[in-house]
Image (cartoon, helix red, strand yellow):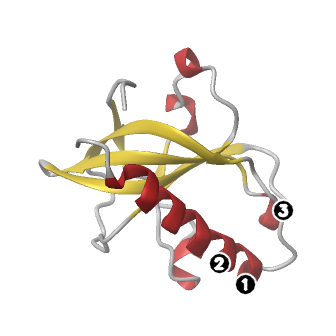
Amino acid sequence: MNNPWISATVLRGDQTGRTIDFPSLNLDASLWPEALQAQPGVYASRVRIAGKTYSGALYYGPRLVKKEVHNVLEIHVLDFAEEIYDQTIEFQVGAFVRPPLDFISLAGLREQLAKDVEEVREELLNQPT
């Protein structure tokens, strides 16, 4: 991963992710790095929290399943379940996984997120932290 680390404060979201077993860190979508010229979607990512580095599944784009049109920036941090609202973290955007998809239910989203997490794990497995 050669992209820069970006500092962000964790915001309170509507906590939908935790209801489907995929809690996420909600961040200010304006932090999405224009320099990446990256398309909306799911990305492998690294996340630094309190000096420790984790793998993450980052999503930038509209939450179509909720019929939203504005972009959000959120990261499901693998193997991490603490509440860290208002704390500063750092994240790094890695490989593109997939574009935004619409789902008819949160159950469909949950199934896709499980697949996304497996792909992120594989993508980051052999990359240095």
Side of 12 relative to 30 (left or right): left
Which residue bears the numbered disc 3?
102
Looking at this view, is 24 or 42 the one in front? 42
Which residue bears the numbered disc 1?
107
| Residue 125 position within the rendered picture, expressed as x and y whole percent measured from the top left | 34, 55
Q: Which mark is residue 10?
A: none
Name which residue lies at 45% across and 51% down: 123
Name which residue lies at 42% across and 46% down: 45
Q: Residue furthest front?
A: 126
* Few, some or many residues within 10 Å of mark 2 (<14, 14–19, 20+): some
| Residue 32 position within the rendered picture, expressed as x and y whole percent measured from the top left | 54, 31
* Few, some or many residues within 10 Å of mark 1 (<14, 14–19, 20+): few
Q: Amino acid at mark 2?
A: Arg
Whether residue 106 appears in this view of the structure is: yes
CA gap, disc 2 and disc 3: 12 Å
Q: Quadrant of residue 29?
A: top right
Label 1 with label 2: CB-CB less than 8 Å: yes
Whether residue 76 appears in this view of the structure is: no
CA gap, disc 1 and disc 3: 12 Å
Q: Quadrant of the C terminus?
A: top left
Q: Amino acid at mark 3?
A: Asp
Of callouts 2 and 3, the N-terminal one = 3
| SS at mark 3 in the image | loop
* Few, some or many residues within 10 Å of mark 3 (<14, 14–19, 20+): few
Label 2 with label 3: CB-CB less than 8 Å: no
| Residue 110 position within the rendered picture, expressed as x and y whole percent measured from the top left | 65, 78
Q: Amino acid at mark 1?
A: Ala
Q: Quadrant of residue 17?
A: bottom right
Q: Which mark is residue 110?
A: 2
Of callouts 1 and 3, the N-terminal one = 3
